[in-house]
Image (spheres, rainbow, N blue to C red):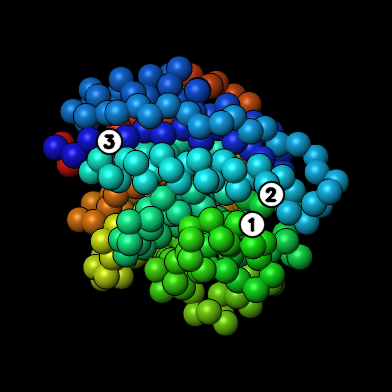
Amino acid sequence: MVALSVIGAPTSAGAFGPGQERAPSAFRAHGLLDALRARGLDVVDRGDGRRAEWRTDQRSPEARNVNTVAAVARELADTVAAAFADGHDILVLGGDCTIELGTVAGAIRDGARVGLAYVDLDADLNVPGTGEGALDWMGVAHLLDVAGADETLTSLGGRRPMLGVEAVRLFAVQNITTFERSVIDRLRLQVEPLADVVNDPGAVAERTRAWAESYDRILVHVDIDVLDYTKFPIAHEIRDSPGLELPQLARLVRDLHGLPNWSTLTLTEVNPDHAPDERNSFGQLIEMLGDVLGDAN
């Protein structure tokens, strides 16, 4: 049985405000590790990285807290690379979406061919000139080294781009800015829209299996903002817009975890401050993670 390394990335430095930095400790406090072990998983807790809370940043208004975001990502990359060197699968608990830069940087360090399944209502393809300063909706743009991206972040993986455009697939995307649409069209980025994930999950899974065959490792990124906030309020972003229901997200993540080359799940944008009943909300998320990650045991 392959061990599962659990890594906390308690940061909101790249976000619009604080809160997500509390999520890793909240998952532990509400029994995540015990729940995973109860599903038969060999869990190795690698602890939390540096805690970095959102701050205003007048020196870099278009890429706020970029140096802190980069420092967190570098530290996470080292921990992820060490877990892969030990032959482990990985669960990363965020933190805002910028932590995916660290997950990817660590995953590619040994030369593995890496594919990224990115589950998020937003495309995260903005750059400092279009993103209103918050780096957490610019992560994919920096992985792909889109023109206008910040070199501090694009250089984290030791190669540019960190991932080729064919290695990234967006899932459940609904909110796409005009700039992001131009990037998607120009790069021909692969997108599974929210409507397809909801209405035809079988076809989405079939297309995903065909895409994933080309890679040694599949990383799965889940921004919990993908959930319909009106039905499950726990995401950092508060909005009244369509999204997935928890069982729909569970099915999508289970299909992705079922890929034979799945290796990592990075969970982001969980804000405990927004949960009306923290114990209940985290209990439901932990049950989902146990169901999905313990599926093969």
Of the numbered discs 2 and 3, the one sitting upstream in the chain is 3
Of the numbered discs 1 and 2, the one sitting upstream in the chain is 2
Using residue 1 as the reference point, say whether residue 276 is left or right of it. right
Using residue 227 as the reference point, say whether residue 70 is left or right of it. right
- Label 1 sits on residue: 152
- Label 3 sits on residue: 4
Q: Can you give x and y, in whole percent of width and height, for residue 45 in the image? A: 35, 27
Q: In 3D space, how far apart are the residues under numbered discs 1 and 2 (Cα atoms)?
A: 7 Å
Q: Can you give x and y, in whole percent of width and height, for residue 5 in the image? A: 32, 35
Amino acid bearing label 3: Leu
Q: Residue at x 48, y 58 (%)?
A: 157
SS category of the residue bearing label 1: helix
32 or 171: nearer the viewer? 32
Mark 1 and 3 residues: CB-CB less than 8 Å, in contact? Answer: no
- Label 2 sits on residue: 66
Q: Residue at x 41, y 34 (%)?
A: 7
Q: Can you give x and y, in whole percent of width and height, for residue 256 in the image? A: 31, 54
Q: In 3D space, how far apart are the residues under numbered discs 1 and 3 (Cα atoms)?
A: 30 Å
Residue at the bottom extreme of this rendering: 186
Amino acid bearing label 2: Val
Mark 1 and 2 residues: CB-CB less than 8 Å, in contact? Answer: yes
